[in-house]
Image: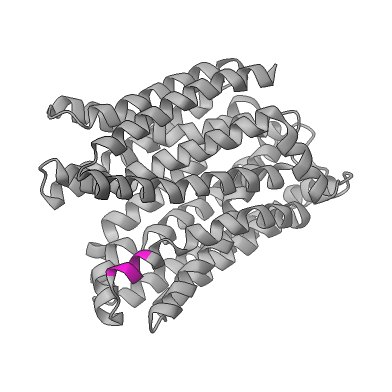
Amino acid sequence: MAPPSEPQAHPHRWAMLAGVWMLYFCFGSTAAAIAPLVSHITTELDLSYTQMGSILGAWQLVYIGAAIPCGALLDRLGPRRGLALGALVVAASGIARGFATDYVTLLLAVAAFGIGGPLVSVGAPTVISQWFVGRERGLAMGLYNAGQSIGTIGALSLTSSLGLSIAGGSWRVVLIGYGCLALLATIGWTIISSQGASRAMEKSRAAEPRQSHAGVYRELFRAPAMRVVLFLAIGTFFFGHGLNNWLPEMLRYGGMDPASAGLWASVPVLVGVVGALVFPRYAVPQRRMKMLAALFTAQMLAPLLLQWSSHGALVLGLILQGLARGSLSVIVVLVMMELKEVDTRRMGAAGGMYFTAGEIGGVLGPLTIGTLYDVTGGFAVGLYLLAGLCAWQLGLLGRLRTALR
């Protein structure tokens, strides 16, 4: 079967999207699965909270170093095999966690996720760039990103209650279960991506001329628009990881009990699913700068509103944060995907650069907010910093608009 000349007209694109959605769902659920089980794991393995903190952050640190090499590997293997390999490593990481016997074995099991994760997160937009164009491309990006959010919500809300109940109270069985779910998704992706239309697409892309990876990275980094996109990635991940990781404690600090704080902290995640499904679909090129400006403004207002004692201000702040959370990164990736320096042959390299920059911000965000709390005794300075970061990103949009001309 010949590869489709117009990818949006080929029905197999929806099967490919379904496969990516499954992998991203497992990405989200596997990444979040340990957090609800912290007390069970620390007790059985005799871990300190400092050790558990290093375990929870291990995969992000590995991810930073692995994203660019994984992007290069993905360009060499193609997204069909690259995504399958990444998902297999994610599954192995999930299963290995259930067999951990001490700090080191659990740390290594979680760290392995940082190798499989980039292949999935870089491979997913590569698939979308090959099979979708126009408004459908934004819709497809939003859908698979919603899959990650749904997986995260499911793991956080069901692991302690339903998961442990089914597993007879064994956290090991629960974690192995998440790994097996990722393994099933890997098998599903392999079946979907092995169909004739997908193989024809892969064969067509493989026949195209290739540059050296060093040359590709140099060209991408020299592009003014790409550099702005990388700064936007750092800021977006800094804000997202910084606020989302500390939000339950911020709400508790404001007077809520832990249960209520956890419930309210889930509001932006739920709203983010809606945002991911709605906004990217309408983020066609002529609207993107205006939409990004509106979303960065909403995100700038969110930390300011969270400082008010008014219940209405809190609700509005959480909703604004959720709307921005679900779609900002998706739209920035759409901008990157359609830069003249980026095409489907370079999407792996560009994605590796994007997620490397993003995860640097993702690690620095929670660390900075926590440090400012220790220094000042509260979260106000950290929240003002996040609002200022969004104002800086609004300024970057002007540079991006100029670079795109």
Q: Position of residue 240 (x, y in %)?
A: 40, 41
Query: On the rendered structure, is 189 left or right of 274?
Result: right
Q: Is residue 66 above or below residue 284?
A: below
Q: Main secondary structure of the magenta part?
A: helix
Say which residue appears at 51% left-offset and 43% top-offset.
Answer: 144
Query: On the rendered structure, is 114 left or right of 404?
Result: left
Task: Tell whether position 247 is magenta.
Answer: no
Q: Is residue 336 visible?
A: yes
Say which residue appears at 40% left-offset and 36% top-offset.
Answer: 325
Q: Nearer the viewer, residue 380 or 233?
A: 380
State which region is magenta. Answer: 49-53
User: Which quadrant of the figure has residue 384?
Assistant: top left
Question: How many numbered circles does the render carry?
Answer: 0
Task: Tell whether position 50 is magenta.
Answer: yes
Q: Is residue 229 above or below residue 80?
A: above
Q: Position of residue 371 (x, y in %)?
A: 32, 49
Q: Nearer the viewer, residue 49 or 22?
A: 49
Query: On the rendered structure, is 178 left or right of 116?
Result: left
User: Which quadrant of the figure has residue 44?
Assistant: bottom left
Q: Quadrant of the C terminus?
A: top right
Say which residue appears at 62% left-offset and 54% top-offset.
Answer: 67
Query: On the rendered structure, is 141 left or right of 105?
Result: right
Q: Is residue 194 visible?
A: no
Q: Nearer the viewer, residue 226 or 199?
A: 226
